Image (cartoon, grey):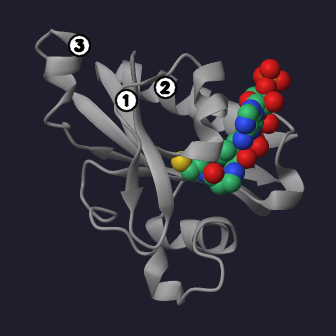
Amino acid sequence: MIQIIPITSRETYSVRHAVLRKGRPVEDCRFSGDELGTTFHLGAFEKDKIIGVATFLMNKDIDLEQIKHIKLHHCYQLRGMAVLEIAQGKGIGKKLLKHAEKLLKEKHIQSLWFNARVNATSFYENMGYEIVSEPFIIPKVGDHYKMMKLL
Ligand SMILES: CC(C)(COP(=O)(O)OP(=O)(O)OC[C@H]1O[C@@H](n2cnc3c(N)ncnc32)[C@H](O)[C@@H]1OP(=O)(O)O)[C@@H](O)C(=O)NCCC(=O)NCCS
């Protein structure tokens, strides 16, 4: 049984490090905005072991309104979405993101956007997100697309 619960930024590090920052210093697991009052972090737990994480920051992307041709007041950005390799493909990422979407809707957030790694875009498309940019490179991480969904 998988439980999705709020966690601290520090609690995200073990999964961020293993999945997103493999072989890099653990300090690289700290993201700007992690500690802001409007930021929240979710963890997926199997028994008492953390196996998935995601972080949500209040942040409006400057291009989103032009892309959607509407005025967006409340936007969040997803960062650091990761599930431990041994637990991938079992529906945990989907459960984590669905839980977050419910919380964001309760906060009257209109849109969730993020920079998606190329190999994860199908996962997000499967959940109703659309690619809204040309591919671009994030240094040290690789090729990305900007993706978003109106909640
Ligand atoms: C991307 C990631 C978060 C998805 O989490 P997950 O728990 O493995 O995904 P789920 O099992 O919940 O998958 C949900 C659906 O998406 C599909 N899916 C999952 N990962 C996919 C991928 N990389 N490409 C295509 N489809 C994918 C699954 O087949 C499943 O489809 P279904 O609902 O039709 O059965 C996880 O695989 C991961 O951490 N990957 C490495 C790090 C990464 O790329 N993070 C994203 C950074 S932007």
Q: Earlier in the sequence, mark 1 or mark 3?
A: 3
Which percent across, then down, holds residue 9?
45, 66
Q: In this view, which residue lies farthest toward the top?
A: 69
Res 112 label: 1
Q: Which residue is mark 3?
A: 68
For disc 2, the neighbor class at 10 Å (few under 14, some 14 to 19, many from 20) is some
Which percent across, then down, holds residue 143?
48, 53
Q: Which residue is mark 2?
A: 101
Q: Are marks 2 and 1 in contact (CB under 8 Å)?
A: yes
Amino acid at the residue labelled 2:
Glu
Per the model, the C-alpha gap separating discs 2 and 1 is: 8 Å
For disc 1, the neighbor class at 10 Å (few under 14, some 14 to 19, many from 20) is many
**Residue in the foreground of this view, choosing between 35 and 143:** 143
Q: Is residue 2 left or right of residue 64?
A: right
Amino acid at the residue labelled 3:
Lys
Q: Is residue 3 visible?
A: no
**Residue in the foreground of this view, choosing between 116 and 96:** 116
